[in-house]
Image (cartoon, rainbow, N blue to C red):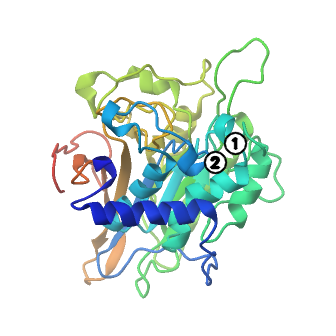
Amino acid sequence: MERVSSSSSSLASLLLLLAFVAFSGEASPPSGSERPVLRFTGKRGEFKILQIADMHYADGQKTKCEDVLPEEVPNCSDLNTTAFIYRVFEAEKPDLVVFTGDNIFGPDATDAAKSMDAAFAPAIALKVPWAAVLGNHDQQSTLSREGLMQHIVRMAYSLSSINPEGLQIDGFGNYNLEVAGVEGSGLANKSVLNLYFLDSGDYSTVPDIDGYGWIKVSQQMWFKKVSSHLQKLYRSKPEPQKELAPGLVYFHIPLPELSSFIESNMTGVKQEPISSASVNSGFFTTMLEAGDVKAVFTGHDHVNDFCGELTGIHLCYAGGFGYHAYGKAGWSRRARVVSAYLEKTPSGSWGGVRSIKTWKRLDDKHLTTIDTETLWEKGNEVGGRRRKRITRGH
């Protein structure tokens, strides 16, 4: 299938072989999988995150694709999803990969643990640190949501956590990660970029409320406490900072606020309704009050891939990644990339985060880059945003 090849059939064959080995369990986990420290690199002053949403992985080669062109149907399976991961890893070389839910499609996965092993295998094989949250379909197989997260946190190179230790909190998979400044710089021992991960649930458990789950009060209280603590650390000695360290938030089910965007206020496309919870639990307001969040990244609605800004916070879809997931025939599967860049201090060393950009990679012949835009620049938090749409490179 041309969609998963780059310039030659030999590369496509190699990618599909890697995918088959990943699912069959013939590749042993690599050694040296101790928990790495996330840090900006001194060479580029950059930290790059690859978001993969809605893989919908099931049983590998047995699991056929949905919503692809007729000529692609015969040879298309979960293995095409794996091949796309390898391609985009090679192209972007991310510092962290974030899987934002519906990692497996429970109804078609005969063994949840085996399906997850296959879904996350490329990150492990390439020794890339990764983190995951759950969607609304992950738990519909042979493991509960708690069981899924227990499995995920034990996997090699996973930075995921089930929940903060000692806290009673809704859901499974509420945690944060800190990205330190450049080694040897004044901010080497501080988090200059804060990442928050939350379990947005699956379906409503309230009898009189239909639809999807939402981020509960206990989760919002945890988020506010962590955000406040990190801000105090960032502003403390040594090297006290005047501004807040920027934060990025990842979960699966989109917020109701995404429905407020109109076409002129977004980059990307909206091709289906916003499938948020039918109630608004107030998490957007909670993030506004915290003051550090610059962007939120979700999945769930596979053929939406837009970003829009509301009161200084960007709300962004990744767009559907997996081939065993509904999509749109002829509309390429895609991944979202977010890259943060440090500023230089007057002395010439690396300081805090200067700007945050995003773009998307398409699973087409050229791994086309589209919709590059600046999400945030220091000193320019609201308004004055620069946007640039491109179709090749960035």
Q: Nearer the viewer, residue 145 or 254?
A: 145
Left or right position of 204 against 54: right
SS category of the residue bearing label 1: helix
- Quadrant occupied by the C terminus: bottom left
Image position, residue 68 (x, y; %): 37, 34
What crowding class fits label 2: few (fewer than 14 Cα within 10 Å), some (14-19), or many (20 or more)?
many
Residue 363 visible from this viewpoint: no
The residue under the point 45% across, 58% down is 244
SS category of the residue bearing label 2: helix
How many discs appear?
Answer: 2
Image position, residue 26 (x, y; %): 61, 70
Q: Is residue 17 above or below residue 376?
A: below
Image position, residue 197 (x, y; %): 59, 50
Q: Nearer the viewer, residue 342 or 290?
A: 342
**Tag 2: residue type?**
Phe
Residue 219 image label: 1
Left or right position of 339 against 289: left
The residue under the point 47% across, 80% down is 188
Labels 2 and 1 touching (C-beta < 8 A):
yes
Q: Nearer the viewer, residue 232 or 364?
A: 364
How much space separates mark 2 and mark 1, taking CA atoms?
Answer: 6 Å
Image position, residue 221 (x, y; %): 69, 43
Residue 63 visible from this viewpoint: yes
Residue 120 image label: none
Q: Is residue 160 above or below residue 209?
A: below
Q: Which residue is mark 2?
A: 223
**Tag 1: residue type?**
Gln
Left or right position of 126 against 28: left
> Which residue extends farthest bottom?
184
The residue under the point 34% across, 81% down is 42
Q: Is residue 226 above or below residue 341?
A: above
